[in-house]
Amino acid sequence: MSLDFQQVREQIRALGENVTRQSQGINERRLKAERLLAEKADAFDWLRQRVRKVVEFYDPNLRCALPRQENPEPLDGRFPLPPAPEKATILAADGSQISPDRHSEVNYCLINVGAIQMTLGGNEAPKVTVSSKLIFGDELITPAGLRTEQQLALERDFYERSLLVGLAETAPAPIASFTDGPMELWGTMDSAQGGAQGDAYQASLERYQEVLERLRQLNVAAAGYVDKPAANLVVRLLEVADAPEERLADVKHELSLLGVTDRHLFNKTLRPGERSAVFAIQSRSALQYRPELKIHFFYLNVGSEGRPWLARVEIPAWVARNAALLDLLHSVLVQQARILGARAYPYLLHRAHEAAVVSFEEKNQVTQMI
């Protein structure tokens, strides 16, 4: 059946008529969010208590930012670009995967991870490392059935940071390492539901935390880099702060800042090179991380004057608590993002992605080899 263009045309016309009204509403909510950010900038204890009350009595699944427990920074804080280190090791890793396909001539999975090592202040060329893992036969089967794309993605995250650990063990300090995407593992819903899926997630999380623990022991400034973030973690915190006491029970459904994202807030306030405050995360998954490994985040403007480019940088607690590691990561990420010019993205992550990607021809070749 072909597309009914008449119906689509009518819907587009209605959409156009509402654009001005919707745009005005979004702008009003953005201004309200900016006002709340300034008003509640230093209300650390009050905000924690308010979030704790919502979680305990009304919405245990609440996911939002929190002022960090130790040395909290003002919610609207702006922190300038630290001096570049004279010497440092930078490690970046990215991965790709071939997911199982029961319709193909042979069914298998493949995880391919590329890592780049570079020394600031040295003359050595960046070192490229590639690690490939084939999953075939009985390895495709889990207690819950055939491996899913999500399970494979969890394993890919594990292998990315495992490769970084191997490189960090012989690299000169100080070391900054980062991967593309969040550091926080997803799968909490499976875990909460129990059963084979939950057990598989818990096993992945334990292995993942062991890798993070090794990075902590090596004192690595580890991070996950989220380009063009769309999260509303800080905005959600502001919605909780904005809710009247008698309406806290409804805060799950009453979204007073609907459509506003953290990117709207910090794109406007952060100048090039500046970072936001470091925030903790309130979520179910946060309860499953060891205290020194709990995930925190900050926003970073890696763009240039007149061309802001916002990233969310996720870091474990040991980095959030160490000013030297935090400054190292802040400086290195901005420096890396400016190498590619107009496309503000860390150069070594770009190189790691190129090393990790599996082309269509390579996939066909693996299939024929099997």
Image (cartoon, grey):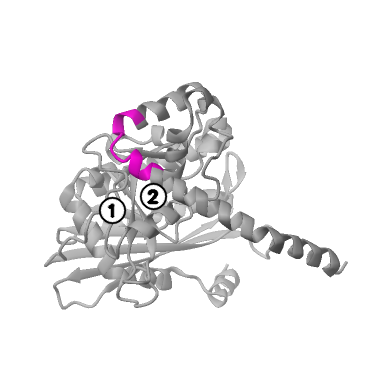
Q: Determine the main secondary structure of the stretch shown in magenta.
A: helix
Q: Quadrant of residue 321?
A: top left
x and y percentages locating residue 28 in the rendered image: 51, 50
| Res. 272 visible in picture | yes
Closer-to-camera residue (146/273): 273
| Res. 260 visible in picture | no
- Give me the residue at 26% from left, 53% from top: 78
- Residue interval drawn in magenta: 36-46
Q: Secondary structure at mark 1?
A: strand
Residue highlighted by disc 2: 183
Q: Secondary structure at mark 2?
A: loop
200 lies above or below 78:
above
Q: Are marks 2 and 1 in contact (CB under 8 Å)?
A: yes
Closer-to-camera residue (219/256): 256
x and y percentages locating residue 328 in the rendered image: 20, 58
**Mark 1: which amino acid?**
Ala
**Mark 2: which amino acid?**
Met
- In the displayed image of the protein, which residue is found farthest to the left? 86
The N terminus lies in quadrant: bottom right
Left or right for 172, reference 368: left
331 lies above or below 61:
below
Counting residues from the start of the chain, the first of labels 2 and 1 encountered is 2
Which label was assigned to residue 222?
Answer: 1
- Give me the residue at 25% from left, 43% from top: 73
Structural crowding at the residue carrying mark 2, measured as other residues with C-alpha within 10 Å and reported as few (<14), some (14–19) or many (≥20) = many
Left or right for 142, reference 287: right
x and y percentages locating residue 271 in the rendered image: 30, 62
